[in-house]
Amino acid sequence: MIYEGKQKIWKDYQKEIPDDHWYYVRSCIRQNFFPASERKFTDITKDILGKDVYETPYHTTCGGIAYHCDAIPQETAMTIVARQFALMTETGYENYVPSCVTSFGNYIEILETWREFPELEARIREQLWKACRREFNKPKYIAHTSDLIYHWRNVIAEKAAHRLIDKETGEPLRMAEHIGCHYAKMFPSKSIGGAEYPYVLAGMIESWGGQVVDYPERRHCCGYGFRQYHMKANRGYCVSNTHKKFESMEPYGIQAILTNCPGCCYFMDRWQYVIAEQTGKTYGKDGFGIPVFTYEELAGLVLGYDPWDLGLQLHQVAVEPFLDRIGVEYDPKAKYLGLNKEDLLKPELPTNLKCF
Amino acid sequence: MFLTMKENVVIIGGGIAGMEAARQLLLLGYNPIVVEQKEQLGGHVGKWHRLFPDMSSAQDLVRRMEEDISEANIFLETKVNSINRLREGYQVMLSNGVNIACRAILIASGFKLFDATRKEEYGYGVYDHVITNADLEAWFNGNADPRIPHAPESVGFVHCVGSRDLKAGNSQCSKVCCMTAVKQAIEIKERFPSARVWCFYMDLRLFGKKYEDFYIGAQQDYAVQFVRGRISEVSEALGGQIQVKAEDTLTGKPLRVRLDLLVLMSGMSCNPEMTRLARMARLDIDSDGFLKSLDNIRSINESNRPGIFFAGACTGTKTVPETLAEARAAALDIHRYLQKGL
């Protein structure tokens, strides 16, 4: 691998990211999957970095999942998105940051479609006005939340309590990065690093002390693929794609995976349990799986947040070996205590995948 | 500097088109002045190893052509700084300070090899064992290349890299890549008989003399495997092997192979130098980015400006024999043009 070759490509895929004043929109599924991630994004950006990040409770789904499952036509998704832009306009913000990669792709695709077909934009404006008497300005900038964490990665590194370094050996942790398909594959120019060798997550890993490890199926879908999962008959195909990825990364000794898509993080985490139950095979060390993190979770660990406040107890794959490796202190007894120390009850442990 | 004993004809470009035209112009009694940016004559062909269909030495060809124009004025490592219209003809100012008055200029600035790094999915410049057709020819010529393993067991060739590719801004077929891939696949098999060799193509455009024979021979005599399907993704496996994913559209099945070496058939794209010259001399550019001939049937060698002529790949993709034939035709066109003016 020629690192300089990648650097040359990364130079071609950079985008302007304003340093402050962002209108933040949450994902419709992330809070069910990894509930602390989005909250930690606002904690990190507002409390630690001192940025102005605003959100409204009136925000809804962007329609992206339904659109990509062929359940609604694009015009419907456009009208939903037009309403989101109207909410942003009403608050006076111009920089729009969605937390979901599919939303990010959806917004970019819609804006590009309107650029190509202004008459369609005019029709959507009319539909929005008829439906809810709202008007909107298009955002001046759109970035994904991972773009913002990437943008501030070096500031986070300066404030780091932990680095992605094995405290026993002093070696950088070997980490894989996996971007969501809708982040860069549709519009590479709207990403950091492009679609083939994306840098948005790799930049965070490097900045926080880890080593990015490539493997042959790095670009392969996580398995989710919308219709692959949401149509129940296709779920075998969904898990087989995830299996293909883990088989490919197995020889590389990868110690953690960083993702920026709700589906990728969820399925690469959860399917390790299914694969272990079906085949008896696990991909981490000593019977554990390979932990899969969101970028907010990883940033939170680097900044010294309590892992259970980051929601890491909701991961299928045990994160404790990773925490031990980078020297994060935690209370094992507090793992399944929720807010107000309420006992969440310990889940049943899998047969083959080692968990606590 | 005075170059006025015989009538000057400035030839911009010292590749095979410029050299062949210079030879003809010398024979016709003119004083061809060849201006070449690089440090040696021969252009792309000068770096090639063997030429189809006779597998003759490219370097021998260039050497013979150089000998044939030893009487010509040749400026190497020299650029054209400006071309100014005079009442009769042109004044050409060179980067070495030489100033030439002439009534005819031949542009033979050739093509630029497509920059394979632009097809990011193939990993040229990123993966250790991905090279281009030009790199392989250089290796055939004896230049060491650490990217080429000592005894590769599997080698793949990707056709149409940057050719017939709207996304890359090149809609044209580069004409020679299909045949070059067949030739190079055979040459690899000759050097490494036990290697498995794959050619990934979308169409095979084998139109020239003996091309089809080469293609049949590659399959029958060398067991080269031709897969009709574009490569979707290239990645690096353990030990630096190249993993290729493609679709075999004839069997309708996806394909995944591990290769020790992947060769990208970089096509021809328009030379940016040509655009500079066009601006200087107010020449028309065609929709494909190459220089625009007066017409593409009878007057391929003629430009929209009086006294400025074209030869070779500056007007579009050409094979070596086509380029040489066009250079000879251009020399005759120049001769006729200058005679008419006397």
Image (spheres, coloured by chain):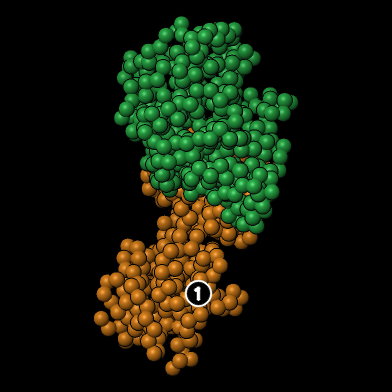
Instruction: Answer whether residue A293 is visible to the viewer in this image.
Output: yes
Quadrant of the rendered image containing residue B277: bottom left
Residue at the spot 57% in from the left edge and 14% down from the top edge:
A281
Q: Secondary structure at mark 1?
A: loop
Image quarter of the C terminus of chain B? bottom left
Instruction: Answer whether residue B11 is visible to the viewer in this image.
Output: no
Residue at the spot 40% in from the left edge and 11% down from the top edge:
A330
Neighbour tally class for label 1: few under 14, some 14-19, many 20 plus, Cα within 10 Å: some
Q: Amino acid at mark 1?
A: Asp
Q: Is residue B172 above or below residue A181?
A: below
Between B326 and B106, the residue placed more toward the observer is B106
From the rendered image, report the letter of the chain displayed in green: A
**Picture coordinates of residue A218 (x, y %)?**
52, 32
**Picture coordinates of residue A183 (x, y %)?**
53, 39
Q: Is residue A49 above or below residue A340?
A: below
Q: Looking at this rendering, what residue extends furthest in the front direction?
A: A133
Q: Residue A176 vs residue A86: left or right?
A: left
Q: Residue A314 vs residue A305: left or right?
A: right
**Picture coordinates of residue B49 (x, y %)?**
45, 54
**Picture coordinates of residue A320 (x, y %)?**
45, 13
Give the number of callouts. Answer: 1
The residue tagged 1 is B284
Quadrant of the rendered image containing residue A70: top right
Residue at the spot 45% in from the left edge and 33% down from the top edge:
A201
Image quarter of the N terminus of chain B? bottom left
Colour of chain B in the image: orange
Q: Looking at this rendering, what residue extends furthest in the right direction?
A: A233
Q: Chain of mark 1?
A: B
Between A247 and B141, the residue placed more toward the observer is A247
Q: Looking at this rendering, what residue extends furthest in the bottom direction?
A: B342
Residue at the spot 41% in from the left edge and 60% down from the top edge:
B46
